[in-house]
Amino acid sequence: MNFISGFRLFFTSAFLLLILMIYGCHADRDLHDPHAYLPSHPVHTDHTELMSGPYETGSDVTKACLECHPKAAAQVQKTAHWTWTSPPVQLPGRAEPVVLGKRNAINNFCIGIRSNWPPCTACHAGYGWVDESFDFSDEYAVDCLVCHDQSGQYVKTKGGYPAQGVDLVAAAQSVAIPSRENCGGCHFRGGGGNAVKHGDLDESLYYPTERIDVHMGKHDFLCIDCHRTENHDIKGRSISVSADDRNQIYCQDCHKGEVHDDERLNAHQSAVACQTCHIPAAAVKQATKMHWDWSQAGQDLPEDPHEYLKIKGRFVYEKEITPEYFWYKGTSDPYLFGDPIDPDSVTLLNEPDGDIYDADAKIWPFKVHTAKQIYDTKNQYLLQPKTYGEGGYWSEFDWHKAARLGSKAVGLDYSGHYDFTHTAMFWPITHMVAPTEQALQCFQCHESKEQNRMNFQALGYQGDPLYHGGRKVSKLRD
């Protein structure tokens, strides 16, 4: 055997061995084992002796963290948790790329953060964002504790500062990988309180039963088991503040291949999102806000946080909600400040992209939150009022002043004339996955005149596709 032949044999053997090693690592994985594809978490390091303090401010803790983790703050500053904006996205019908995010989006809850920074930025991953002059380049303003504290007493307040009475030494010594409490402290309480915004994220997920969420309840998943993290960049998107589908997570990250024993169910995967069948209801334990009427604010009426507050208006909360279903391909058409509206119609603030003819779209479950919010009757666009602080509506109950100050902050003209119009926001339902035996059955979407769960005509079908004459997804999507 000459040298070349020997080298070829060695190379071939090594290549085959590598293939066997790669596939061998996965060969013993049980596709039905919920832990088979989960990330490995780092071994915990006890920081009791490493973080002795004293610390006067949260930034003092960050300085100490950066002594051992010098790249951490710079990594955080590249993420949406810090910037509250997304990368520029070119959207259909827009002349310039769109930069969206919590920093500049409009919603139909508290409407917008500009001029209202301090209460909104209590959930920012930083310290001191109290106005438009916040320095996003200051590494010492990064809040390490909001994601890593495990002391159970770390709370943030207006501007993102630690609340009075927080023991910063105890918090710093307790740090570990993010828990549900770290993530939920902000994400479960978005919109001003527990269970307000999403419908599938609330404090029942801190210690849920299997009925509430099979992943967290039965299998004890952490948020970061699905929302995997690399260099402090946490996977996941929300179409309320993102127009693209970058950095998204999918059920198929763990549930690979043909996951059903019944081929008819596997065939649905090309047109039906996993969540549609496996999350038959949202807000399964705690009621979520479904409607907010700002036009009713300012009246001296009996107050109840689930029905009426003088500073915010009237609310409708519901529990065990049946989702609404729409075609969705992971992107949306966002309403931007200054976009014209028809005040006699419902303005869709983040309409999901996709339809029956789109091969990338699937039928998804949504919570649809409706509202009645302020708009400029002459300029015919939505307004973002100043609600917090001096001149804000919550202090003076003066819509004209609130509209004028808020419009100045976002760079819009205010004509001096306002009224209220109807809007809707779409919130994809992706959490509160039910146990397998509670997933939707065929009859709950098909042959179900009583439940009327799935409106096939609204989705673009001639009727129930189960029957002859109904449009077939496979024919449209070939």
Image (cartoon, rainbow, N blue to C red):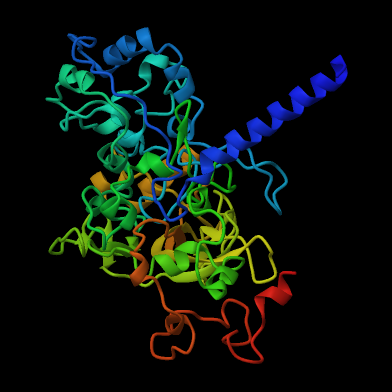
Residue occupying the point 46% across, 60% down: 425
Of 153 and 304, nearer the camera is: 153
Residue 394 in view of the camera = yes
Query: Where is residue 111 drawn, in percent x and y?
Result: 40, 50
> The C terminus lies in which quarter of the figure?
bottom right
> The N terminus lies in which quarter of the figure?
top right
Where residue 462 sits, quadrant-wise, is bottom right
Query: Where is residue 193 drawn, in percent x and y?
Result: 25, 50
Give the total number of marks visible in the rendering: 0
Residue occupying the point 75% across, 23% down: 10
Query: Where is residue 66 drawn, in percent x and y?
Result: 37, 11
Query: Where is residue 229 drawn, in percent x and y?
Result: 45, 33
Residue occupying the point 38% across, 28% down: 131
Does residue 379 lie above or below 478 as drawn? above
Residue 194 in view of the camera = no
Does residue 316 lie above or below 248 as drawn? below
